[in-house]
């Protein structure tokens, strides 16, 4: 199966998890929750009037792999747009980056993300949780952005407009898109290019595709 096909099949597991796999992944996640002293598993009642998506997260192993692929530096501000309970932020905050920021529309989830990051063990980076719709938030200070299945194409377009200022500042902007259903919107914007794409990866315990985007250098950007 090519990467393109796998991405098109996102949401439909490209491999089956055996009960043993499921148990191993669960134990691994439980280990990291214990190690970091956070609680990020489990769903929360969803208000469809508030957002396009309910809370879900990905395995720790998948987050470590994504961060490894992006190689953030001490100058980076990592932003999870739709941060839920803050699992991705917890992983990112273990790196010696400038700051990690979560944006979350759902107040109770944002409060949980804040509590998790505040009591976390071994956190190296400062953090900030912004409780607001991402389309209304100034994202110009960010450099590594992460989105997992948070909203549809309309809001994604508005969010990209918000982070255009980060690109215009000349920063090395990267955008990690997990479960990339609306990649067309990123392609349309003309100032981001996809430089890598992962199919669902059993080795990362991840059932979703992930694509990696970066700012197109100024001279080459089309829009
Ligand atoms: C699928 S969850 C992903 C959570 C987190 N990023 C993770 O990977 O662990 C999507 C999150 O986006 C939030 N969300 C949805 N629409 C949003 C919006 N317009 N602005 C900010 N957050 C939003 C939801 O409340 C939910 O917590």
Image (cartoon, grey):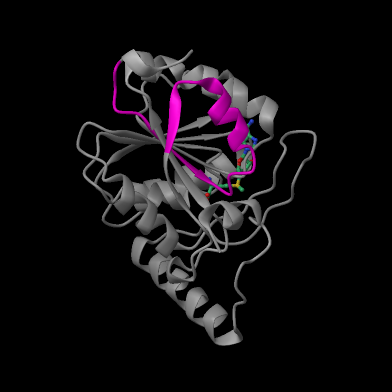
Percent of width and height locating residue 200: 53, 61
- Magenta stretch: includes residue 187: yes
In this rendering, the count of numbered labels is 0
For residue 31, above or below residue 166 = below
Residue extending furthest toward the right: 49
Residue 43 place in picture, x, y as percent: 66, 57
Q: Which residue is pictured at 49% across the width and 70% down the height?
A: 202
Q: Which of 9 and 97 is in front in this view?
A: 9
**Position of 156 compared to 95: left or right?**
right
Locate residue 38, reporting x and y percent: 44, 58
Q: In this view, does 109 lie to the left or right of 122?
A: right
- The residue lying toward the viewer, choosing from 120 and 200, is 200
Whether residue 165 is situated above or below residue 1 in the rendered picture: above
The residue that appears at 53% across and 23% down in the rendered structure is 160
The residue at the far bottom in this view is: 20
Residue at x-position 74% and y-position 51%: 45
Q: Looking at the picture, how far across and down is residue 216, in whole percent? A: 37, 24
Residue 70, quarter of picture:
top left
Quadrant of picture, ligand 1: top right
Q: Can residue 133 be seen in this view?
A: no
Task: Residue lying at the far front in this picture: please name it.
Answer: 2
Q: Which residue is drawn at 29% across and 28% down?
A: 172
Residue stretch rendered in magenta on the structure: 170-194
**Quadrant in the picture for residue 169:** top left
Figure quadrant of residue 10: bottom right
- Asked whether the viewer can see residue 120, the reply is yes
Is residue 101 highlighted in magenta? no
Quadrant, the N terminus: bottom right
């Amino acid at each position: 199966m090519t990467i393109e096909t796998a991405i098109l099949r996102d949401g439909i597991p490209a491999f089956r998890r055996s009960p043993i796999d499921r148990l191993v992944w669960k134990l691994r996640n439980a280990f990291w929750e214990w190690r970091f002293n956070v609680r990020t598993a489990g769903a929360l009642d969803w208000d469809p009037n508030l957002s396009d998506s309910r809370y879900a997260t990905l395995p720790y192993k998948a987050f470590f792999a994504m961060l490894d692929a992006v190689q953030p530096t001490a100058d980076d501000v990592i932003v999870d747009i739709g941060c839920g309970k803050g699992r991705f932020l917890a992983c990112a905050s273990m790196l010696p980056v400038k700051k990690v920021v979560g944006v979350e529309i759902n107040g109770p989830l944002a409060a949980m993300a804040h509590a998790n990051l505040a009591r976390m063990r071994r956190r190296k980076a400062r953090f900030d949780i912004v409780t607001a719709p991402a389309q209304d938030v100034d994202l110009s200070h960010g450099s590594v952005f992460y989105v997992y299945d948070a909203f549809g194409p309309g809001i994604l377009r508005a969010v990209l407009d918000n982070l255009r200022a980060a690109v215009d500042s000349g920063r090395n902007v990267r955008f990690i898109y997990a479960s990339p259903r609306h990649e067309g919107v990123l392609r349309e914007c003309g100032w981001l290019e996809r430089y890598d794409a992962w199919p669902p990866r059993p080795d990362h315990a991840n059932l979703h595709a992930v694509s990696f985007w970066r700012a197109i250098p100024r001279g080459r950007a089309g829009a």
